[in-house]
Image (tube, rainbow, N blue to C red):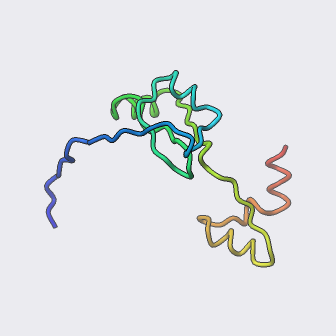
Amino acid sequence: MSLTPKTMPDATSATLYFGPWYRKSPFFEATQRWGCTAYDVYNHMYLPAYYDDLAAEYWALVNDVTLWDVAVERVVQISGPDGFALANALTWPTATPICTPWAWRTASA
């Protein structure tokens, strides 16, 4: 295994056409107004991916406030006799503290 750093080749781009085959989030026009220049497609929706150079985006995330359009994410509900065990298996470290009646009372207080 080599410990010498490797450089990434220059990124290449492809044209992404905004058409009816992918959905736009309710915030799509706002992402364009704020300067989004590249999108990914995720869950059949456009996901804003690039606004500025990577260093500027990193420092904005560290020092300022950033808003992300995460409308592509989906909410799921797990139910059934083994639903709680499945939720515990999928989360780290465990879902038990957030799934107790005590946690619900303190979270809503």
Q: Is residue 1 above or below residue 33?
A: below
Q: Is residue 106 above or below residue 92?
A: above
* Place of residue 26 in the rendered image (x, y in percent of width and height, measured from the top left): 65, 34
* Place of residue 23 in the rendered image (x, y in percent of width and height, measured from the top left): 59, 42
Q: Is residue 60 left or right of residue 109?
A: left
- Figure quadrant of residue 94: bottom right
Which residue is outermost to the top? 33
Which residue is outermost to the bottom? 81
- Figure quadrant of residue 95: bottom right
Q: Is residue 18 left or right of residue 15?
A: right
Q: Pick the residue in front: 14 or 73.
A: 14
- Name which residue lies at 26% across and 42% down: 11
Which residue is outermost to the front? 20
Q: Is residue 97 above or below residue 10?
A: below
- Name which residue lies at 18% across and 47% down: 7
- Quarter that holds the C terminus: top right
Q: In this view, does 6 lie to the left or right of 77?
A: left
* Place of residue 74 in the rendered image (x, y in percent of width and height, measured from the top left): 65, 52
Q: Pick the residue in front: 12 or 8.
A: 12
- Quarter that holds the N terminus: bottom left
Q: Is residue 33 above or below residue 2?
A: above
Q: In this view, does 83 lie to the left or right of 94?
A: right
Q: How many labels does the image show?
A: 0
Q: Pick the residue in front: 97 or 40.
A: 40
- Name which residue lies at 21% across and 47% down: 8
